[in-house]
Image (cartoon, rainbow, N blue to C red):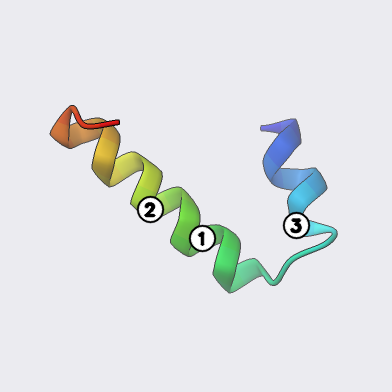
């Protein structure tokens, strides 16, 4: 999760949470 922490230092926490949720959602759907 180093990437998340590094990005958090640059971007807003809300944006990180949103991106993480989207990636997790796509992963669960089995899409790329």
Mark 2 neighbour class, 10 Å CA radius: few under 14, some 14 to 19, many 20 or more: few
Nearer-N-terminus badge (1/3): 3
Q: Helix, strand or loop at disc 2?
A: helix
Q: Position of residue 12 (x, y in %)?
A: 69, 72
- Residue 17: give its label: 1
Secondary structure type for disc 1: helix
| Image marks 2 and 3: residues in contact by CB distance under 8 Å | no
- Which tag, 2 or 3, sits closer to the chain's start? 3
Q: CA distance from mark 1 to mark 2?
A: 6 Å
Tell me: 14 left or right of 20: right
Q: CA distance from mark 2 to mark 3?
A: 15 Å
Give the left or right position of residue 1, taking residue 6 as reference: left
Assess whether mark 3 and mark 1 are in contact (beta carbons under 8 angstroms): no
Residue for badge 2: 21
Q: Is residue 30 above or below residue 14?
A: above
- Quick one: quadrant of the C terminus? top left
Instruction: Residue at 34%, 41% (x, y): give it.
Output: 24
The circle drawn on residue 26 is none
**Local crowd size for mark 1, using a 10 Å CA cut-off: few (<14), some (14–19), many (≥20):** few
The residue most toward the front is 32
Q: Which residue is mark 3?
A: 8
Neighbourhood count class around disc 3 (C-alpha, 10 Å): few under 14, some 14–19, many 20 upward: some
Establish if 22 lies above or below 10: above
Residue drawn at x 38%, y 53% is: 21
Mark 1 touches mark 2? (CB < 8 Å): yes
Residue 32 lies left or right of residue 12; in this view the side is left
Cα separation between marks 1 and 3: 10 Å
Q: Quadrant of residue 6?
A: top right
Give the left or right position of residue 19, taking residue 21 as reference.
Answer: right
User: Looking at the picture, how far across and down is residue 23, in whole percent?
Assistant: 39, 43
The quadrant in which residue 15 appears is bottom right
Q: Residue at x 18, y 27 (%)?
A: 30
């Amino acid at each position: 999760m180093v990437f998340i922490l590094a990005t958090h230092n640059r971007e807003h926490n809300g944006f990180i949470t949103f991106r993480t949720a989207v990636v997790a959602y796509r992963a669960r759907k089995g899409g790329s």
